[in-house]
Amino acid sequence: MRIEVNGEPRQIAATTVATALAELGWGEARVATALNGDFLPAARREAQVLHDGDRLEILAPMQGG
């Protein structure tokens, strides 16, 4: 399926947000996610089905000073 990840088109085999994160290398990372512009809590990622053309945003916390 073709989705957009952080503004970049990607071809993935995953069918849920959780499996997409794992496929994209973010499976163990503590990140925030948004699907089609709406915040998606971590507790809902496993059940959230992806559809062709969806927009997934993955945001990692930044540290610094």
Image: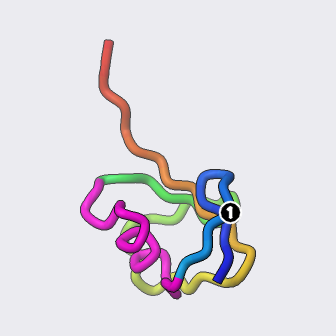
The residue closer to the viewer here, 34 or 9, is 9
The residue furthest left is 28
Category of crowding for the residue at label 1, using alpha-carbon neighbours closer than 10 angstroms: few (below 14), some (14–19), many (at least 20): few
Residue shown at the point (49%, 58%) measured from the top left: 33
Question: Residue 8 at what x, y percent from top left?
Answer: 66, 55
Residue of label 1: 9
Question: Residue 9 at what x, y percent from top left?
Answer: 68, 62
Q: Is residue 60 left or right of residue 30?
A: right
The residue closer to the viewer here, 12 or 44, is 12
- Give the image quarter of residue 19: bottom left
Does 48 lie within the magenta span? Answer: no
Residue shown at the point (35%, 72%) measured from the top left: 22
Question: Residue 4 at what x, y percent from top left?
Answer: 67, 64
32 shown above or below 50: above
- Give the image quarter of residue 62: top left
State the quadrant of the C terminus. top left
22 shown above or below 49: above
Bounds of the magenta segment = 13-29
Element type at marker 1?
A: strand
State the quadrant of the N terminus. bottom right
Residue shown at the point (40%, 76%) measured from the top left: 18
